[in-house]
Image (cartoon, helix red, strand yellow):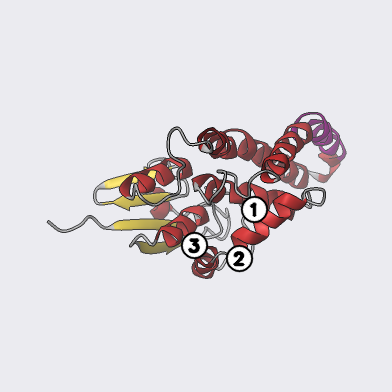
Amino acid sequence: MAAKKLTLHHLEYSQSFRILWLLEEMGQPYELKSYNRDPVSVLAPAEYKAISPIGTAPVITHGKLALAESSAIMDYLADLSPDCGLRPEVGSEDRTRYLFWFHTAQGSMMPILLMQTVLRMTTERVPFFLRPMAKMITGALTKGFIQPRLFALLDQAEADLSKKKYFGGSALSLADILIVYNIEGADSRGLLGAYPNLQDWLARMKARPAFQAATKLDDRPSMILPSK
């Protein structure tokens, strides 16, 4: 029986870069099909949304299966290659740390960064006569809600990386690959100045051959763009 074909449907400049990096890191055979964003809306084109179960990036197809959501895809790919070494084993000292950061990346940090982006876009796009009020409201939300939560997470990450070199503990894991979008997003906003361990971690991730190979395939100037 022929093996099922694994395809990454890759939307340019999106969170699907993380799946591209993971596949390169694993050495998993795959087909890459890239899609350009709509030039007006900057969102995924209709042909991409027709493939994705929820119309967002990333998405893979494996035979007749179509699967979306970064963390779900990562677990699925790791299940296909259980010896990949990218998930600390149950009972290992790194397991709970890995689980925390793997779920924090999408469950806590990403919503904060997305909210910050939405507030910025709102301020830029409202009619000019409403911008002073919009800036006042978004500024209060940023200072009172977004920044305290984001900096608390960055503080915890900095402390954890002072103990072990990776978000998942002693070695590269899915947690590192999943959270890179968030940390690069914080870096692009100039938020890592007081976090040398995070800066070092990000530099080490970008230096990995698989990361560089994925970057060439993606040809991305930035990761901070809409993901849909």
Please tell me which of labels 3 and 1 falls first in the chain.
3
Spatial CA span between label 3 and label 1: 16 Å
Is 1 one of the magenta-colored residues?
Answer: no
Single out the mark in the foreground, 3 or 1.
1
How packed is label 1: few (under 14 Cα within 10 Å), some, or many (20 or more)? some
Q: Which residue is mark 1?
A: 224
218 w.r.t. 83: above or below: below
Q: Residue furthest left?
A: 1
Q: Nearer the viewer, residue 122 or 14?
A: 14
The three-letter code of the residue at mark 1 reads Ile
Q: Is residue 198 left or right of residue 3?
A: right
89 up-or-down from 18: above or below: above
The span shown in magenta is 132-146
- Residue carrying label 3: 36
Mark 1 to mark 2 CA distance (whole Å): 20 Å
SS assignment at label 3: loop
Instruction: Name which residue type carries label 2.
Output: Ala
Residue placed most toward the observer, 203 or 67:
203
Camera-near label (3 vs 2) is 2
Residue 207, labelled with which disc? 2
- Within-10-Å neighbours for mark 3: few <14, some 14–19, many 20+: some
Type of amino acid at the residue the image marks with label 3: Asn
- Dominant SS type (magenta): helix
Q: Position of residue 10 (x, y in %)?
A: 45, 58
Queried whether the magenta region covers residue 143, the answer comes back as yes
> Residue 90's x, y, as percent?
43, 34
Helix, strand or loop for disc 2: helix
Q: Nearer the viewer, mark 1 or mark 2?
A: 2
Q: Position of residue 14 (x, y in %)?
A: 54, 54
Q: Residue 73: name its quadrant.
A: top left
> Which quadrant, please, contains the N terminus?
bottom left
